[in-house]
Each structure stands twice: as structure tokens, then as C-alpha cells.
Image: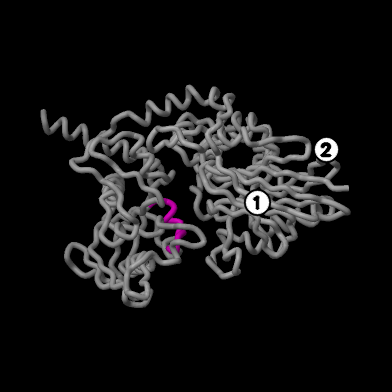
Amino acid sequence: MKKTLKIYFTSDMHGYFAPIDYATGRRKAAGLANLIPQFVKDGNTLLLDGGDTIQGSPFAYLQAQGGSARLFAECMNLAGYDYVTLGNHDFNFGYEYLASFLENLKAPCLCANITDVTGRLPILPSALKRLDNGLCIGIIGICTDFINVWEKKGNLTKIRVGDVREALASVYGKLRSEADVLIGIYHGGFERDIETGRVLSTTRENIGYEIARDFGFDLLLTGHQHMAIADAVIAGTHIMQTPANAEQFAEAELIWEDGRIVSCRSALHSAGDCSDPRVLQLLEEPERETAAWLDAPKGHFEAPLLPGEHLEMALHGSGIADFFNQVQLWASGAQLSTTSLGNEVKGFNTDVTVRDIVSTYIYPNTLVIKEVTGEVLCRMLERSAEYFDMDEAGNLRVSRKFLEPKIAHYNFDYIMGIDYGFDCRRPEGSRVTHMLYQGRPVEAEQRFTMVMNNYRASGTGGYEFLRECPTVREILTDMVELILRYFEEQAVEEQEAKD
């Protein structure tokens, strides 16, 4: 007898629950409210989520300032989620914010390698679900263990993040023997090209290919890399992944007959323009408050700071990156500063609103002041110089290293405080032509204080050597808040100068 399992899967919604483009304030075909009308559930359907749910949008940022993610849980309850797992960004605003989400969420949270040492958070490693048609479905949740590398220590004082493989191994065998169909929800991506097997990354941030190869999941639902993947198979495991910000969801249909899976097909679907009225009503007043906050004027530039193509900005500099570095130097008093730009950059017109700020500096970063040597500076610059590649005609282009397995323009750094240059015709590792500090050549043993965001200070993005550099101090204020303070101080200074 044929039995069917249907799965709807979302991941990396990043606080995009309403159909709004926060950069412009206009309606957009995206958001959980626009996904829900397409979820047609019955007793043989599962609605699952892969994490990175409560951080990432200006709306989520403002909710975090209020200390509660309850609204996100209530929206997901209206959707009827069956199970969720956690993503690395779900920890960005601290323990209590995460607790307000999980404690109001009706769907069980499954994450085999995440443990709350206090026992407060309702996190389970796995679950068994019996469908109306009798199929027994096993589900294991898991999250990239690079949380330990990225996350601020203060946000993990009650949380233990274990090794992904070890956690899987501890629960996999029992569920595999009990379940007709075994599903993994992994908040992580792929370290190899899913079609060719070519190695794309040698870190342990993403090990989806390894999991599919070494564990016998029937379906592996992935996230973190924001790639559009459906109807793909690795070593017999069907894999899926969705883009970010609730612009699409994945749907899979599995048919089971005579004790085995006889077919599995999946596809990605766009959010569309139809919204769930219950979610819109729930979000109406909070979104109105968010819009008012976003449209509040905060500062002024003499000339616009607008983005160009990423390659052009990397070659010739960026006024936006210069501004971020200027704020970091103002906040820290360090000698040098380094920053990067997101894959999508809004930029600033002459009159600056909060919307401009949160849409241009899009990460929940704090700052770290490190002591670095001239040798470390050179290594940082050589890493950034790997951003450039040449085609057969000798034209510069963005290196594949920064485009695979996912686009990562944010791993090119803009450094303020030294003069430097690259010769991209040279082999990687020997492209830096000069480094000058206050007009003098930088010596390998020379020491500087350098301010950077906490993500870069963790050594990720190819800057592993920064982990070993001594930390002078940390500034635990969110960078968006620092930018707001910077504008406020500049306004006061301008007024005093007029007076």
C-alpha cells in the first residue's frame, strides 16, 4: 500500500515575517505571512524550519531591543509548524531573547548538539512522529558547531554547543532502526560541490556533504548558506535548501511502499503576493512602530555614500566602508580599523534615516580591539588580495574563493590607518606591494591596536590567525547603536560650533 509524506520546509527567515522590503518600506513578495497560504496541511504533512529565525531584519533588531521574540513564535504557531531547529544567528541577541521565542513556540525544538545547562529551554535532540497513514517519521535537528567560534561568550554562558558528528552519532542509530523515514534538519551547508564533489571549503563550518555521505538520512534539509537547492541527491540522501528572508520555501513529496521509499521529489516555491490575514493583523501595530523608527532622521552627509559594484569598490575603495571604519575608530580609539561590506549594500543619501543605517550595516556585530603586528597586517592584506582573479584576457574579476560555496563579498576587508597596495599579477600570498603607517614602512615586528567586528576577530572568513592576536578590550555595544550614537554626537558638535 502506498503511503505519502509531504514536507514544507523553511529556513533562514531572519525575521522577515511581513511582506515588507525594509530597505524601501514598500510591500514585497516575501515573508512568512506570504508563505503560509501555500502550506496545505493534513495528518500526513510536516512543516519544518531550519533556524536563523529571530535575527536579521530591522524588525527583529527592534524586537530584540524590547527583549522579546514572542511575536515570531506566535506567527509560527499560526503557521502550524511541527518541528524547528536552531541556527547560529538565533543566539545573537542573548539567552533571554531566545528563551522568549522557544517558550512561546508550540513546535518542539530539535537540536542534538545544543544543550541548555540549566534545563530551562525546551530543546530536544530528536523526535518520532507517527503520521495518520501509519508512517513513522524520525527527525533529528543539528546546528553548525561554529557557533562556538562566532558567538559572543556572554550569549553562551548557559549553552553548550557540541560537535555535529558526535551529536548525530549519539542519536542516529536508534532513530534509524525505529523510523520508516529519517529526516535530518541541519543548520549548515555544503563543504563540497553537490554535483561534482569538488572541495569548496576545508573548515568544519559546513559539513552537509559529509553528513549525507556518512549518515543514511532519507532527507537532509539544510540551511545557513542561503542557496536554492531542490531535487538533488548526495549518496542516496535527498537534499534541500532555501534562499534567505522567506522569499521561497521548499516542498517535498515522498512515497513509501512495500517497506521502502520508492520516490522522492522536491521543488522550491516563491512566496507570492497572497498574505495570511491573521499574521498581518498580529504584526500590524509592531510593524507600524518599526516603520516610524526606521524613518526617523538621524544625520547628514555633505555628499551621498552610495555603493558600486563589489569589484570596483574593492579596487578603488568605498566611502561606505570608510564611514564604518571612521565610526569604529571613534568608538575605540584604536590606531587602525578594518571592516567589510555585506553582499547587498544600500548606502546613504545626504539625509540619513535609521532605515538607511540598518539596511547598510546589516550584521549584529560588536567590536573587538586586537593587538596586531606588521606581519599580521600583511597576512590580512594577502587574504583580502585573494579576492581578485584574472581571466584569460588579463581582466580582473572576483575570485571563485569568494563566490563558492556561497557568495562572500563580506570576507574582503577595507583597512583604515595604513596605506597599502596590491599587485594582482603576482601569485597569491605575495601580492602586497607596500604598507605604510604615517608615511613610514611597516615593520614585521611593529605593533598596533586594531578595531574590528567580533565576527572577524573570531578568525572566520580566512583570517584564522587573528584568533591568536591578543585582545586589548571589547566594546559590547551593537555597531548599529554605535552608528546612531556617532550621528548624535556629530549633531551636538555641529550645534555647539554654530552657537
Q: Residue at x 75, y 60 (%)?
A: 216
Decide: few, some or many residues near mark 2? Use Cα within 10 Å; few <14, some 14-19, many ≥20: few
Which quadrant would the C terminus be assigned to in this image? Answer: top left
Residue 461 colored in magenta in the image: yes
Q: Secondary structure at mark 1?
A: strand
Q: Is residue 274 visible?
A: yes
Q: Secondary structure at mark 2?
A: loop
Q: Residue at x 36, y 64 (%)?
A: 384
First-in-chain label (2 vs 1) = 2
Q: Nearer the viewer, mark 2 or mark 1?
A: 2
Residue highlighted by disc 1: 221
The range drawn in magenta is 453-463
Query: Looking at the image, what colour scheme do you see?
Result: one colour
Asked whether 299 or 351 is in front, the reply is: 351
Asked whether 376 or 283 is in front, the reply is: 283
Could you say where residue 440 lies in the image, as x and y percent from the top left? 18, 68
Q: Is residue 44 left or right of residue 371?
A: right
Q: Amino acid at mark 1?
A: Leu
Q: Residue at x 69, y 59 (%)?
A: 166
Could you say where residue 123 lies in the image, as x and y percent from the top left? 68, 41
Decide: few, some or many residues near mark 1? Use Cα within 10 Å; few <14, some 14-19, many ≥20: many
Q: Amino acid at mark 2?
A: Asp
Could you say where residue 115 lies in the image, as x and y percent from the top left? 65, 46
Gap between marks 2 and 1 measured at Cα = 22 Å
Q: Quadrant of residue 290?
A: top left
Could you say where residue 125 lies in the image, as x and y percent from the top left? 71, 47
Q: Is residue 135 left or right of residue 227?
A: right
Q: Is residue 404 left or right of residue 236?
A: left
Q: Is residue 90 visible?
A: no
Residue highlighted by disc 2: 132
